[in-house]
Amino acid sequence: MNTAIYAHRGASKIAPENTMPAFKLAKKIGADGIETDVQLTKDHIPVLIHDESLNRTTNGTGFIYQYTYEELKNLDTGSWFATKYKGTQIVTLEEFLTWIKDTKLKLNLELKNNIVDYSSIEYIVQEQLQHFNMDTRTVISSFNPNSIRRYNDLFPDADTALLLSKRVKDPLARVREVGANGLHTKYSVLTRRLVKDCQNNDLPLRIYTVNRPSRLMRCYKLNCNGIFTDVPHSAIEYKELYKH
Ligand code: G3P
Ligand code: MG
């Protein structure tokens, strides 16, 4: 059993999601990798943030695509979580890659382009990954099948995964249709049959968002290739327990 533990938006239970403190804590805790979400500003700068709108996790309002990076960079994305994180800034992909490249962490970069279809996000992201030599330990994922297809057409060597939030009739056919190398699904989609089908087709299967002990244990037992968790510390603890 070697299920990789990806910290979902960093160690997002104990630090504000998708911020440098959350990423650094994930590394300190001993996660195998980090999952983070990328979107584009008005001037096409990739930034790491989950929602299309600024409202929930910053002191700004409106959509990310409406602002230049210069306009966003001084927003506070920590106070909503806890006062001790006041002044935490939105992280650019470049800033994040500069840090992660010197670690051993794997990366899952989720293109958040299923609601706003950011033009050329695939080019912009891949260029930065290559610049930092991170393309070889990064899995690109998206709920947007067209974007995954585009990514594979443009960069055939890229490692990509299709994201599914619901059970569908033939998930592997969806993966094949877009030319992805892997499948990322919500926990509710997970079945023993899906695991077998993925294994028989050499398709890595990774599951989000797995926080509860019983669910963590089930993913380990089924030998899923990876999990995304807000609580990497307990995911590691339960993985140790599972081994013994
Ligand atoms: O990439 C796995 C997971 O992050 C997908 O859902 O909404 O948490 O980005 P979400
Ligand atoms: Mg995500």
Image (cartoon, rainbow, N blue to C red):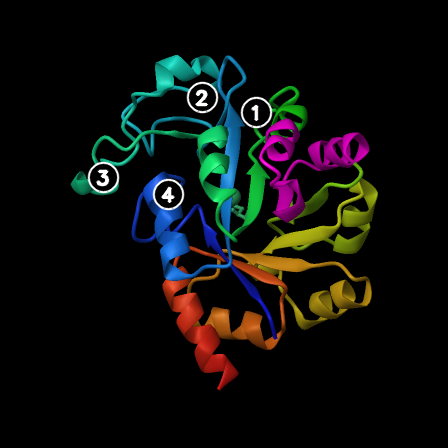
Quick check: marks 1 and 2 in contact, CB under 8 Å?
A: yes
Quick check: marks 3 and 2 in contact, CB under 8 Å?
A: no
Residue occupied by mark 2? 64
Quick check: marks 4 and 1 in contact, CB under 8 Å?
A: no
Residue 142 visible: no
On residue 85, which mark appears? Answer: 3
| Separation of residues labelled 4 and 1 (CA atoms) | 20 Å
Q: Position of residue 221 (x, y in %)?
A: 58, 77
Q: Tell me if residue 32 comes above or below residue 236 in the rendering.
A: above
Q: Residue at x 43, y 74 (%)?
A: 238
Residue occupied by mark 4? 17
Residue range in magenta is 126-155
Check disc 3 and report its element: helix, strand or loop.
helix
| Residue 30 or residue 133, whichever sits in front | 133
- Mark 1 and mark 2 lie on one chain; the one further toward the N terminus is 2
On residue 116, which mark appears? Answer: 1
